[in-house]
Image (cartoon, rainbow, N blue to C red):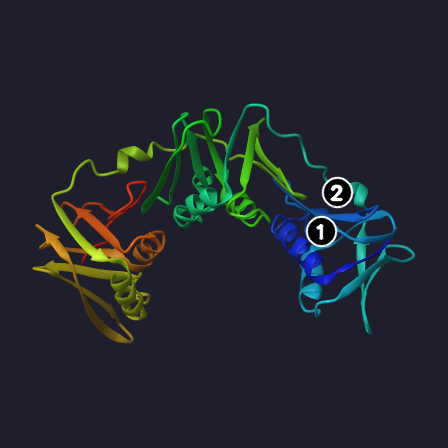
Amino acid sequence: MKLDCPRKEFFEAVSAATAAASVRTSVSILQNLKIEARDGFITVMGCDGEMWVEREIACMVQEPGAICLQARLLQDIVGKMPDGDIELETADGNQVTLRQGASEYRMMSLDAEDFPEPPAFGGDGELKLRMGTLRKAVDSVIYAVTQEQHKAVLTGVLFTYNGQTLTLAATDTHRLAVRKVEQEGIGTSINAVVPEKALKAIKSLPIPDDSDIEIKFGNGRLGVDSDGAKVISQLLAGTYPNWERVVPPESTRTWTVEVDQLNEKVNRIMIFAKDNASRVRFKGSGDQIFLAARSEEKGDGKEEVPMISNNGDVEIAFNGKYVQDALGAIDGPGVRIEMTESSRSAIFRPVDDNGYFCVIMPMALA
């Protein structure tokens, strides 16, 4: 195999495929990327055994062929090269040479025949919507996905579609983020849990926000194939918990606050809160919210922010990082925080958008 291609495009393809390559595995082929060269283009593919990411780019191919190279090593080398053409060429045995000007690197390769081929996908259902709509919906909930691998079904986002409303939900049992998109006719009925890793790969596809993306479901997996880029992933097995049961059915107190002001004050007071399990105390009094946090080693801090109160004289503690995440998903200028008492969950909602909310469990005030 011998080829010449632009470094920038090659690096983008390598980075996208590396997102699917496995780091923690004893199966060495899954730590590699498969690079296959044909007339006029190459494909770069990564796989961890459950997800495949493939990118295709135009290229000057002098000799076709296929090889497997270590994903992280290739990404590191190409990422540090300047823009310009690079040359990739196989040598005798299992060596591959990467050149750019006077720079030359030799890497060991594996047999491309051992790389797992991507499976078929689709057949049971599909969703077709604007890429920008999907990115916004995913960004507004993905922060709530759990990082605890033993809670497997919670390491993804629940997608449901009933013909009218697409709902995305994510929870780590301490908070719940929900985004609803009202849109008829964008697909068939869907109820599937999509892994966080797959959603990040789909979000990074080279598809403009104003273009459509079609996600196909079937055989326990999903797939996207568009403009020389492909993502295929296994769906998460298991029953997703009934998240609607943890949404407080009513509230007796509300704080309405400007998002930017509250976010600024929380960001600052987190300097102390992060040393105390990120605990921030919020005390409503009159038309002000008083924030407080303390660190055994550093000291303590206080902030205040104006609000519009409805029976809002209450004190409650939240994980400040959770509040930051919830506020970060709000596009509008205002947030409404709905509560009942200090020991019960609160709901964070945009003032002017009923399609998104985040439920946050309180922390002990002590």
Question: At 37% from the left edge and 45% from the top edge, which residue is drawn?
Answer: 172
Front-most of residues 20 and 44: 44
Q: Quadrant of the C terminus?
A: bottom left
Amino acid of disc 1: Asn
Q: Residue 49's image quarter?
A: top right
Circle 2 crowding by C-alpha within 10 Å: few under 14, some 14–19, many from 20: many
Q: Residue 345's image quarter?
A: top left
Mark 2 = which residue?
A: 115
Q: Is residue 170 left or right of residue 306?
A: right
Whole-percent x, y for residue 109 in the image: 80, 54
Whole-percent x, y for residue 83 in the image: 70, 67
Instruction: Residue lying at the far front in this picture: please name it.
Output: 210
Residue 120 numbered tag: none
Q: Is residue 172 left or right of residue 262?
A: right
Asked whether residue 1 appears in the rendered view, the answer is no
Question: At 15% from the left edge and 49% from the top edge, which residue is drawn?
Answer: 254
Circle 1 crowding by C-alpha within 10 Å: few under 14, some 14–19, many from 20: many
Q: Residue 314's image quarter?
A: bottom left
**Number of marks drawn:** 2
Give above or below for 343 relative to 80. above
**Sequence order check, earlier mark of 2 and 1:** 1
Question: At 16% from the left edge and 53% from the top edge, which residue is drawn?
Answer: 255
Whole-percent x, y for residue 27 in the image: 69, 46
Q: Is residue 277 left or right of residue 88?
A: left
**Residues at marks 2 and 1 touching, judged by CB atoms closer than 8 Å:** yes
Q: What is the spatial separation of the Cα atoms under label 2 and label 1, in whole angstroms?
A: 9 Å
Mark 1 = which residue?
A: 32
Q: Give the secondary structure at mark 1.
A: strand
Whole-percent x, y for residue 68 in the image: 77, 50
